[in-house]
Amino acid sequence: MELKDCKVLICDDSILARKQLKDVLIEEGCGLFFEATNGQMAIDLYKKENPDIVFLDIVMPKVDGIEAVKAIKAYDNDACIIMVSSVGTQNLIKASIEEGANDFIQKPFVAKQISTILKNRVEG
Amino acid sequence: MFTQLFGNYLLRKAIITPEELLECMTEAGKSHAKLGTLCIHAGLMSSAEVEKVYILQTHRDERFGEIAIEEGYLTQEQLDNLMEQQPPSYILLAQCLTEKGILNHDEVERLLADYQMETELYDLEMMEDHKDRFKKMVTHFCNFSDLRNGEVGVCYLQLLFNNLIRFIGDDFTPMDLVPFQEYITHYGAKQSIEGSFQLQSAIETNEQAAIAFASRYAGENFEEYDEFVSASLQDFLNLHNGLFVVNMSNSDAVELEIDAPEEIDNMLYAPDGYTYLLPLAFTFGTVNFLITFAK
């Protein structure tokens, strides 16, 4: 799939974190974005828009990232979900992967990490 | 971090005023260490010898190093070694203090020695990146020894100072910690950490300092207080606390959880517990960090 056709869902309660990630993704060539500010909104948007890749924060109000992974994976077992969080403890990484997340990026991320993910998960 | 804590020491001893320190920190950020200053701090020349070379420089068309060698104060080898070394950052603060006439070279040397004695730190060249010595400095600075989780507080502040330098800049001085019960905030964010111990922290500042802090953190040029500035304060707090939780998990096998950060603009902030105000005097303004330990 070409990146310009890739539908990306970004879920983070921080408007700044969403903007910073979106800037990197635009730089990489992505052009179709959906944004959610909490886990529940991400689940609803996923069901509505069926994105190709999801970038999901963990610590968020209402429904957190781990619960959101579980719900999205229950709806679509092929969903590609990348966790992006500052709380990269072994327990949380393990919980994310066990619920079905495909990868985990520790904040602060660098553009190269996002680029590699896109190459492996979307273009590859 | 030695520079920032040495600045705090000078303030605590009322040797300089906050305004003088701020001015010197601003200058230090734009300066380069002079050879004379490096010679004094390396113990190769006395301040009187350096002054003499400066005077001779006004009569001769020669560089400092050339005159110092001719006068027998330095060897070529010593000069070459000095030129090759990256000077520690406190040298620039010391240089600004002397250039502005706030202290003379001898006074700076004596105060550096006094601070080293008080903190039991003797090798300044080694100190900048030395974890144990850094911990010793922070332990001496915060004096959390009466608290049940005092050791955790030291780790928390160590990481905070590192993250401030890493994500905002090193042009700040931590003022003394002040216990308090209530605080009226301007703009800021709070976040709780829970698990085998509880800790709540908050960041708070005025409008202009918030904009400057956020601009540095986000790498943007914000001009007014808006949702991005607010999000930057929350993100910095969230990032710092997240990294703290990761550190505690990796080094001490302590598993902690953090809540989502919350805005605390224009409110009476009165958390339940032992709370300390840590003012951080940046060159763009003061940013307050508020740390609460559960009772």
Image (cartoon, coloured by chain):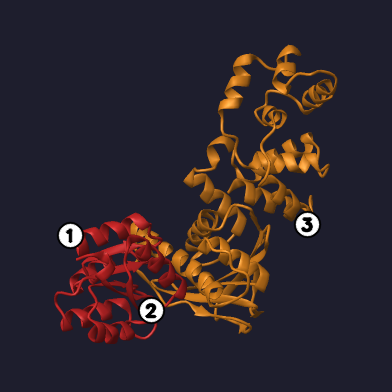
Chain colours: A red, B orange
With A87 as the anchor, is B121 left or right in this view?
right
Looking at the picture, how far across and down is residue B217, in whole percent? 53, 62
Secondary structure category for the residue under label 3: helix
Q: Residue A115 is drawn in which quadrant?
A: bottom left
- Which dot, 3 or 1, sits closer to the camera? 1
Figure quadrant of the N terminus of chain A: bottom left
State the residue position of label 2: A60
Looking at the picture, how far across and down is residue B232, in whole percent? 52, 70
The crowd level at tag 2 (other Cα within 10 Å; few <14, some 14-19, many 20+) is many
Q: Which mark is residue B19?
A: 3
The residue sitting at 23% across, 67% down in the picture is A94
The crowd level at tag 1 (other Cα within 10 Å; few <14, some 14-19, many 20+) is few
Which comes sooner in the sequence, label 1 or label 2? 2
Chain for disc number 3: B
Chain for disc number 1: A
Residue flagged by tag 3: what amino acid is it? Glu
With A21 as the anchor, is B168 left or right in this view?
right
Looking at the picture, how far across and down is residue B231, in whole percent? 51, 74
State the residue position of label 1: A124
Q: Nearer the viewer, residue B213 or B194?
A: B213
Contact, CB < 8 Å: mark 3 with mark 2?
no
